[in-house]
């Protein structure tokens, strides 16, 4: 048994924010203890005790958009190192994207990923691809892939250009009641991806990626989702117009009695603008690109009003050699698992944009709900997947558990440090050095 004492317990799934203790027994949440009488009934000496005074105790974080590059690109990341990075960031569950080599368009590759993931301390789930080979021409055998453990579908990294094929995919997914997550960038609009078309692209003498590339695809696919009733997740939204389209589509869905429209924001899109590319070069190159301040503000407003219901990292490791290439040749993407919570606290909570309860809900409860995972809650009987963090602890971004270090946040001082990550009642990560002196293991 583990007894987490004296922490500020925040469980958005049950509307709980209060000073309390959490009892973990047999790998599950046994009870949230609120008063002396309840505590006195517990033999504390029979428990491993963690004094969480000064810390927040919350459901383990859930990231539904990560790339562990395994199989095929394990020099960037593999399932083991990706798991370590996730646990260090307070994540207890992740959903892998399918753009590996080979891609996860078949049950053999899916089984490899899930079996390898099961050997880590992290709960690892995976999407399969929507189309075979991510070629955008033929649908995968969705029913078979779901039966073998896929939790949803995505061709993340590539948009699906054929509207009729997209509609067919969403109809199949609707029948299976599983989500489809889409990377929305029309390549016919883009001259050089990874940098916003505008002043920064002009600085580099390249065409860049215009906002219309995202807007047009979002508009098309939201309408198809409304027509089919499929569960649709718009990934890593970056434009103010895209946010507005999702907001309107959610209203229309509600009028139809549907709650099938979802959207993600990444920490880099609510923290940075295109100006970061001038400062950090390829370390701030990503798809979709960082855009203007008005877009960043719109993403935050979307998180505030629930238009954007999920924060996901799009953890995208690349080697230092790859990122050292010229702006037009370096791959897009940054790592994010180890900085996500701190960026949320620093740039959303401490700036009074979001209450801490909403941040946790967007990073735990809502993403778990999208994929139907038994996570994101401290309900009695739920798996004891817990993060304990000090929201006031400052730290400087330096070394990573990830194989890669491609992040524009290196060297920055952020607030909010994970002290403990617990999965199924087992402490799988601890780092008390940068947390409150009050938060420590008693026995």
Image (tube, grey):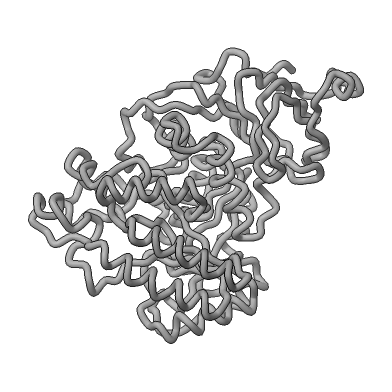
Residue 212 in view (yes/no): yes
Residue found at x 22% / y 62%: 210
Q: Residue furthest top?
A: 437
- The quarter of the image holding the C terminus is top right
At a point 44% along the width and 29% down the height, the residue shown is 350
Give percent across and percent down for residue 145.
60, 73
Residue 59 at x, y = what percent?
Answer: 65, 40
Residue 397 in the image, given as x and y percentages of width and height: 38, 29
Please state which of residues 228 and 2 is positioned toward the viewer in this rendering: 228
The image quarter in which residue 7 lies: top right
Taking 149 as reference, is 7 above or below it?
Answer: above
Q: Give the mark count.
A: 0
Tell me the quarter of the image containing the N terminus: top right
Q: Nearer the viewer, residue 105 or 187?
A: 187
Within the image, what quadrant is residue 90 found in? top right
- From the viewer's perspective, tell me whether residue 388 is left or right of residue 426: left
Drawn side of residue 27 relative to residue 205, left or right: right
Q: Residue furthest front?
A: 255
In this rendering, is residue 403 above or below 142? above
Q: Is 402 drawn above or below residue 374 in the view shown?
A: above
Instruction: Pick out the residue farthest to the right.
Output: 41
Between 35 and 120, the one lying in front of the other is 35
Can residue 338 be seen here? no
Residue 432 in percent (x, y) is at 56, 21
The residue lying at 18 percent from left, 60 percent from top is 208
């Amino acid at each position: 048994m583990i007894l987490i004492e004296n922490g500020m317990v925040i469980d958005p799934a049950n509307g709980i924010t209060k000073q309390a203790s959490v009892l973990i027994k047999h790998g599950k949440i046994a009870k949230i203890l609120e008063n002396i009488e309840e505590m006195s009934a517990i033999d504390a000496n029979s428990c491993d005790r963690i004094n969480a005074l000064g810390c927040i105790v919350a459901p383990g974080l859930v990231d539904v958009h990560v790339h562990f590059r395994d199989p095929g690109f394990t020099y960037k990341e593999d399932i083991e190192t990706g798991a370590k990075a996730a646990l260090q960031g307070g994540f207890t569950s992740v959903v892998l994207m399918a753009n590996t080599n080979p891609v996860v368009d078949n049950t053999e590759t899916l089984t490899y990923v899930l079996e390898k993931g099961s050997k880590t301390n992290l709960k690892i789930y995976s999407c399969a691809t929507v189309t075979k080979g991510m070629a955008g021409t033929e649908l995968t055998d969705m029913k078979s892939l779901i039966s073998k453990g896929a939790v949803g579908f995505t061709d993340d990294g590539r948009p699906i250009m054929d509207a009729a094929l997209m509609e067919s995919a969403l109809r199949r997914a609707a029948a299976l009641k599983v989500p489809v997550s889409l990377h929305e960038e029309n390549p016919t609009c883009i001259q050089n991806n990874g940098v916003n078309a505008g002043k920064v692209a002009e600085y580099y003498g390249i065409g860049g990626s215009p906002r219309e590339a995202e807007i047009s695809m979002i508009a098309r696919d939201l309408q198809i989702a409304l027509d089919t009733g499929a569960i649709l997740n718009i990934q890593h939204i970056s434009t103010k117009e895209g946010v507005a389209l999702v907001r309107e589509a959610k209203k229309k869905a509600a009028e139809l009695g549907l709650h099938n429209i979802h959207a993600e924001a990444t920490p880099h899109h609510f923290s940075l603008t295109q100006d970061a590319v001038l400062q950090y070069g390829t370390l701030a190159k990503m798809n979709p690109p960082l855009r203007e301040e008005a877009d960043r503000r719109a993403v935050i407003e979307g998180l505030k009003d629930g238009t954007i219901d999920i924060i996901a990292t799009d953890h995208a490791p690349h080697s230092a050699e790859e990122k050292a290439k010229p702006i037009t040749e370096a791959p897009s993407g940054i790592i994010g698992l180890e900085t996500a919570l701190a960026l949320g606290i620093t740039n959303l909570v401490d700036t009074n944009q979001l209450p801490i309860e909403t941040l946790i809900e967007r990073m735990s409860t809502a993403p778990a709900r999208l994929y139907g995972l038994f996570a994101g809650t401290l309900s009695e009987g739920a798996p004891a997947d817990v993060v304990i963090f000090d929201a006031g602890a400052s730290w400087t971004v330096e070394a990573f558990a990830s194989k890669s270090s491609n992040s524009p946040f290196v060297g920055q001082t952020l607030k909010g440090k994970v002290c403990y990550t617990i999965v199924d009642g087992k402490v799988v990560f601890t780092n008390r050095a940068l947390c409150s002196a009050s938060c420590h293991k008693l026995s």
